[in-house]
Amino acid sequence: MKKRILVLAAVLVGASCAVGPNAARDVSATERNIKIMPHDEHSHARPDEVRVDHLDLDWTVDFDAQRLEGTATWTLTRRDPTAPLRLDVKSLDIEEVEAGQGEVFRAAPHEIVPGDPVLGDTLQVELSPGDDRVRIRYATTEAGTGLQWLEPSQTRGGKLPFLFSQSQAIHARTWIPCQDTPGVRVTYSAVVRTPKSLRAVMSASQTRELEPTADHRVFAFEMPYRIPSYLIALAVGDLEFRSLGPRSGVYAEPEVVEAAAAEFRDTESMIDAIEGLYGPYRWGRYDLLVLPPSFPFGGMENPCLTFATPTILSGDRSLVSLVAHELAHSWSGNLVTNATWRDFWLNEGFTVYLEQRAMEKVYGVERKKMEVMLGMQELREEMAELPPKDQILHVDLKGRDPDEGFTGVPYEKGAAFLRLLEQTFGRDRFDGFLEAWFNEHAFTSVTTEDFVAFLEQRLLQADPEAAKAVDVHAWIEEPGLPADAPDARSDAFARIDALVADWKAGRSSMDSWPVAGWVTHEWLHFIRILGEAEKPETLAEIDQRFHLTESGNSEILAAWLELCVHSRYEKAWPALRGFLLRQGRRKFLKPLYEAMAKDPALRPMALDIYREARPGYHAISRDSMDKILDWK
C-alpha cells in the first residue's frame, strides 16, 4: 500500500500537517524502548506474544450502504514464534485474512473466537515461521458503535451526509480489527476514497489529496508517531478549512466554519502557553474539527485533529476551555497515555490541571478560579451519588464496560490531587516535575504504579518534610475527597452570592444587577446557587428578566433547563424538547433525562421526547439514556 501511495500524483490539502521537528528522534526512541504492558482486562489481545506495530488502511467510504470496506494490514513483532496474532473485533464482517512477509501474502488459517457483549470477539490468526504481516479484508456493519453515519438532515448544511468515528474507550474494534488497548501504540497510514462532494480528515500528521478516480476523491494520511487505537479517528463530510495561525486551523461545515474560526482564534496562544510550561508541542499541527450536533462528547483529543461539539460555539469564547482541555491532551493522554482504562485519571486529571493552567495564562487568574470552583462543585455533587468504588482514582473496572469509569472523578479529583502537589511543593518545582514526566515518558503508555514511583523519586524523596503533608495512597486508592482537597475562591462568584442574598431578602431588585458583563461561568454559578427548590413562579420572574429559556449558550441553557425540570417550570417545556432534539452531547442529555425520569409526573414526557430524539443520538449517548429510562 505504501508503494501505491507514492506513485500517485499528490496535491496538498489546505491544512497539510507537517511532521514536527522531533519526529525522528521520538519515534526511534520509542522503537528502542517498547515495554511490556500489564494485562488489559478490556482487550483480548496478547501483545506480550505478538504485538502490532504499524497499520496500513485502505478504505472506500460507502454512504449508500453506510459502511467502510477495504483492508487493514498489520506489521507485527513476534515475541513468541509459535503464538497466533489475536485482535479485538466487534460487529465486523471479516471477508478474508492473509499472512506473509513484505508484500507477499497467502491465505491464513483464522477463526473468530466468541467473546461477550461488551468486549466483542477475538480474531485469531495462525502465523507461519517468518510471517511479519497480516492483511484483513473486511467491512463495518450497522451494529458497530465506533462510527456514526448521518443523513443530510442531521447536518448543518442539510444537503450532504456525514460520517465520524468515536473510538474511546473500546469502540475502535467496531471499525478496525486491532489490539484495542491503550497499552499498545502503533503508527499508521491510510488511503480513503470518498464521494466526489466530500472531504476526509483523520488524526494524522500528514494529509494529501491524491488524483481522483472516476467516482471518488482520494486522500492519503500518515501518522509516524505511535498512538493507541482509540486515537485513530476519521471524519468525512462537506468540510471547509480556515487557518488560525502558523500551525493551527479549523475544519467545519461551510455554514459553521467562520463562526468556529472566530471562536477559536486564541488557539495559538493556548499552544504557546502550554509549551511555555511543559515543553514543546510534538505533533506538528493542531487543528480542530467541528462536528454535527450528535457528537456525544464535548471534544475528543484525536492527535493533530481535535473533534469538537458545536455546542461550544457561544460567540464570546466563554466555552473555549474545552479547546484548552483537548489541546492539553497533546501532552497528557496522547504523548503520555494511560496503559489501561483503570489508569484513566492519568489522562484526564492531568489534562484538567493543564487546561486550568493554560486558561490562567491566557485569560487570567479569575477565569481559572471560576472554572476550578465550578469543577469542584460538580465533583462534590456527583460523588454524593456515586458508590464508594467509583470514587477512587485508580478505579477497579474489571468485568465492567470502561465507559462506566467516565465520571467526574478522574477529571476533577485527579486535577485536585495535582493542585495539592503544586501547593505543597511549590509551583516552580511542580512544573519542572511535570515537564520531566512528559519528556521522560513521551510516546509511551504508563500505569498508576509508574506515576507513583516517579512521584516518590522526583518529589517526595527530594523533600521528605513537605511529603509528610500528602497522603498519596488516600488520594489515589481510597474513596471520597480528602479533607485537604484544594479549592478556589472567586471574587466574581462572591459578588453574585451577595446579589442573590440581597434579592432573596427583599433588599434589592434584579433590575439593578450588572449582568451585561457576566461570562458563562457567572451565569452557571447563579443558576446553581438558586437550588432545586425554587418555585415555578420564582423561575418565571427570573426568566422574564434574563430570558434564560431563550439562551443560545448551550451550557447556560442546559443548567437552566435542569433547574426548570426540578422546579416543574412548565413554560420551559418547549425549549427542553427542542434542546434534547437538536443536540446529542451526553453531558447535557444525562442530567436532563435523569431529572425527568426521577419525577413520576415528568417521566412520560421524557419517554415521549426520547422516542423522537433517540434515532439521532450517537450509540454512546443512546446506551446511557437507555439505561436511565429503562428503554426496551
Image (cartoon, rainbow, N blue to C red):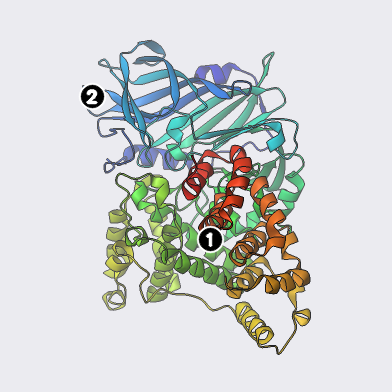
* SS under mark 1: helix
- Image coordinates of residue 472 in percent, x first then y, are 30, 67
Pointer 2 or 1: first along the chain: 2
Q: Which residue is mark 1?
A: 355
- The kind of residue on which mark 2 rests is Ala
Q: Is residue 76 left or right of residue 524?
A: left
Question: Is the residue 366 above or below the residue 50 in the image?
Answer: below
Q: Position of residue 551 (x, y in %)?
A: 73, 60
Q: Residues within 10 Å of mark 2 (few under 14, many from 20)?
A: some
Numbered marks: total: 2
Identify whether 618 is placed above or below 218.
below
Q: Position of residue 365 (x, y in %)?
A: 58, 73
Instruction: Judge left or right: residue 297 versus residue 35.
Output: right
Residue extending furthest front?
601
Q: Which residue in the structure is indicated by mark 2? A: 83
Identity of the residue drawn at 33% across and 55% down: 395
Residue type at mark 1 is Glu
- Residue 579 in picture, x, y percent from top left: 67, 51
